[in-house]
Amino acid sequence: LPAAASGSFPRVARESNPGGSHIQVGNVRFGDGNFVIIGGPCSVESREQIIATAKAVQAHGALMIRGGAFKPRTSPYAFQGLGWEGAALLAEASRVTGMPTVSEVMTIDQVDRMATQVDMLQIGARNMQNFDLLKAVGRCGHPVLLKRGLSATIEELLSAAEYILSEGNPNVVLCERGIRTYETATRNTLDLSAVPVLRERTHLPVIVDPSHGVGVRRWVPAMCRASKAVGAHGLILEVHPNPPEAKSDKEQALTFEDFAAIMADLATIPLSHSIPQVTA
Ligand SMILES: [Mn+2]
């Protein structure tokens, strides 16, 4: 490890790869001058729902599909996901569209099997400091989308990523998804200032999740454009064929039309991968 990359996350630190890492997930590359859009439902609910959504987001420029199979819900009585059936339907949507997929794993025993079903494993916000799970996805070697915990500092997020890299898996993309503050108007407080801080402190690509960040459909578009302007490498967005009927996170789900409008708007915003430098 380079001498400069000291501290508690030497492998994750920018100094260990100053030019920035490119993370390959199927035919998609993060961190390489692309702005990668991942679109799909909060939860996989049926074959029709996931395939229709995958085709719709692809038609408007998404490069990857998301869909939850195992859902960490606040209430034990809320929809818990279709489990392995949902993962298989997501794999089917990938075969139909050719797009790679991402889905969450909640336990160590799900890791190896989920890696046969999807192209990228998500560690959700509630598991960001589940250190044994981080080690397991590190050993697995499959690309990982690591979401920031609800109450995690940027330093804690970077240390969590270090767990994965320290097990020999360099394929990590970070995700800012909003943190808990005293504000209640939005579901979380989307910390977009985390993007330039992370861009400075780590070589890993950084994407933003405005859907969970604000939790309200009509405020998602503004945060999408802000995310691109602030220098993120991509977005992950929740999209549903009929949001009022969604089994999870219906308040924040975008319609296909909403998604199309956001994609058209984003095309007008330049990539901000080189932000003017000022004296440190
Ligand atoms: Mn969700």
Image (spheres, rainbow, N blue to C red):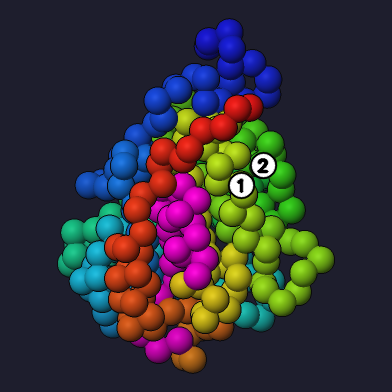
Please state the horizontal and vertical placement of residue 194, each as a whole percent of the image.
Answer: 61, 47
Going from the N terminus, do you reach mark 1 or mark 2 first?
A: 2
In this rendering, position of residue 187 left or right of residue 134: right
Please state the horizontal and vertical placement of residue 231, each as a whole percent of the image.
Answer: 46, 47
Mark 2: give few (<14), some (14-19) or many (20+) Cα within 10 Å.
Answer: some
Report the residue marked by disc 2.
154
In which quarter of the view is residue 5 placed? top right
Q: Which residue sits furthest bottom?
A: 244
The residues colored magenta run 222-243
**Residue 194 circle label:** 1
> Would residue 191 be seen by someone viewing this image from the given angle?
yes
Amino acid type, label 1 = Ala
Q: Is residue 128 magenta?
A: no
- Quadrant of image for the C terminus: top right
Amino acid type, label 2 = Ile
Please state the horizontal and vertical placement of residue 150, each as a whole percent of the image.
Answer: 69, 57
Which residue is found at the position 62% from the left and 61% from the top? 190
